[in-house]
Amino acid sequence: WAAKPNILFILVVGFGWRDVGYNGSTFCETPEMVRLAEEWMRFDQCYTPSPICSPTRVSILTGKKPARHGITQ
């Protein structure tokens, strides 16, 4: 049996790209996210299917774009 990879997926709702400490925020304290960024890896060029929470969550679960799964608001 091949070993399954350990994947940690963090979905943060209501944050902008600059709202974490490793991108320069001094307002939001995110020490654990800073530690993860320093010790593990970062994805700085990412895509979100929607700037709204619900369509993004459904897209993550279904693998479909909001226009395909129908949740757009």
Image (tube, rainbow, N blue to C red):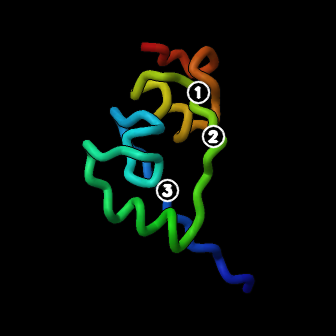
Mark 3 or mark 1: whose residue is earlier in sequence: 3
Q: Position of residue 33 (x, y in %)?
A: 40, 60
Neighbourhood count class around disc 1 (C-alpha, 10 Å): few under 14, some 14–19, many 20 upward? some
Left or right of 46 in this view: 35 = left
Q: Residues at badges 1 and 2 in contact (C-beta under 8 Å)? A: no
Question: Circle 2 — which element?
Answer: loop
Amino acid at pointer 2: Cys
Amino acid at pointer 3: Phe
Give 36 or 7, whichever is nearer the viewer. Answer: 36
Left or right of 45 in this view: 18 = left
Reading the image, the residue beneath label 1 is 49
Mark 2 or mark 3: whose residue is earlier in sequence: 3
Amino acid at pointer 1: Pro
Name the residue rendered at 49%, 30% in the picture.
Answer: 56
Q: Position of residue 48 (x, y in %)?
A: 57, 31
Q: Quadrant of residue 3?
A: bottom right
Reading the image, the residue beneath label 2 is 46
Q: Is residue 7 above or below residue 3?
A: above
Q: Is residue 5 above or below residue 68?
A: below
Question: Circle 1 — which element?
Answer: loop
Q: Position of residue 43 (x, y in %)?
A: 61, 51
Give 46 or 11, whichever is nearer the viewer. Answer: 46
Question: Circle 3 — which element?
Answer: loop
Q: CA distance from mark 1 to mark 2?
A: 10 Å
Q: Position of residue 7 (x, y in %)?
A: 55, 66
Name the residue rendered at 58%, 57% in the picture.
Answer: 42
Reading the image, the residue beneath label 3 is 9
Q: Quadrant of residue 64?
A: top right
Q: Quadrant of residue 14?
A: top left
